[in-house]
Amino acid sequence: MSTTVTLINVFTAKPGKQQELAKTLAEGTRNFFSKQPGSLSSSVVVGGDGSKVANISQWRSAEDIAAFRSDPRFGEYMKSIVELAAGESMMGHMSYSHAGGVEN
């Protein structure tokens, strides 16, 4: 099992706000999260249903996630997200992956 921590946030956008939410998540990742200690990767996935957007990121440790969440900028960022969507978060370790024909 990997020691990398995966953080998955799934949001349901308010009607008509899916694209704005995806843009806000991408900008937050580009300008803030990706620059935090322990940030390894991040993706924004837009659902085909017109409402769901997922943000999937990988971190060196749960402590790194806690540190960025305690940054005052995180609270301000989350206010902008809450205006666009409701969401839930899950943190865990990868137990299986498949990429390019290689299983891990």
Image: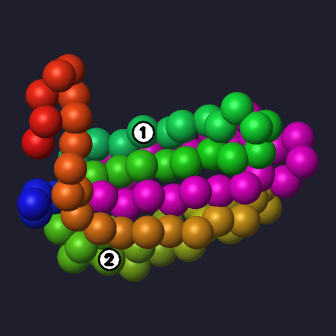
The quadrant holding residue 70 is bottom left
Q: From the image, tell me which residue sits under label 1.
A: 43
Q: Image height check: is 19 above or below 93?
A: above
Mark 1 residue crowding within 10 angstroms, few (<14) / some (14–19) / many (20+)? some
**Mark sitting earlier along the chain (1/2):** 1
Judged from this view, the residue extending furthest toward the top is 100
Q: Is residue 67 left or right of residue 43?
A: left
Question: Which region of the structure is painted magenta?
Answer: 5-34
- 67 vs 94: above or below: below
Secondary structure at numbered mark 2 = helix
Q: Is residue 44 magenta?
A: no
CA separation in Å, label 1 and label 2? 19 Å
Quarter of the image for residue 100 reads top left
Q: Secondary structure at mark 1?
A: strand
> Relative to 65, does residue 39 appear above or below in the rendering?
above
Identified by mark 1, the residue type is: Ser
- The residue carrying mark 2 is 66
* Residue 103 point in image, percent of width and height: 13, 36
* Residue toward you, 103 or 30: 103
Please tell me whether mark 1 or mark 2 is closer to you in this view.
Answer: 1
Location of the N terminus (image quadrant): bottom left
| Colouring scheme, one of rainbow, by chain, secondary structure, one colour | rainbow
Q: Is residue 37 left or right of residue 70?
A: left
- Residue type marked 2: Ala
In this rendered view, identify the residue nearer to me: 34 or 15.
15
Question: x, y (%) of residue 67?
Answer: 30, 74
